[in-house]
Amino acid sequence: MRKKLNCWEFINCGREKGGLMVSSLGECQVPSEMKFDGLNDGVGAGRACWLSSHSQCVVKNNRMIKSCYNCKFYKRVLYEEKHKKPFKEKIILKKELIDS
């Protein structure tokens, strides 16, 4: 079984604590959001970033992701965790944060 990646490892943003892009882009709060620590076997909100109000995931042209449901990382976690019943319940938990 391959290693389960956290969002910053998957997208290689460099905004995790000590990351290469912290000095220019700032540190992302997702890795230190401990209320989601361990969810889907992630560190902080690293495998539940769509639930975090601090997620600052940026895509092409520096535009924020409007829907995490279209994100490749989200889809990967969904696939990896699909056998866990609590996972699907947690996805819908903060849908209003995703769509705003």
Image (cartoon, helix red, strand yellow):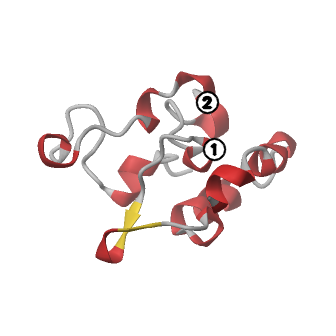
Nearest-to-viewer mark from 2 and 1: 1
- Res 81 visible: no
Locate the C terminus and report the quarter of the image it occupies: bottom right
Left or right: 53 with respect to 90?
left
**Above/below status of 85 relative to 70:** above
**Above/below status of 73 relative to 89:** below
Residue type at numbered disc 2: Phe
Return the disc, 2 or 1, that comes first in the chain's sequence.
2
Residue annotated with mark 1: 51
**Above/below status of 67 relative to 17:** below
Image-quadrant location for residue 77 = bottom right
Dot 1 falls on a residue whose secondary structure is: helix
- Identify the disc placed on residue 98: none
Dot 2 surroundings within 10 Å: few (below 14), some, or many (20 or more)? many
Determine whether label 2 and label 1 are within 8 Å by CB: yes
* The one of 67 and 70 positioned closer to us in this rendering: 67
Residue lying farthest front? 100
Residue at position x 71%, y 52% in the image: 96
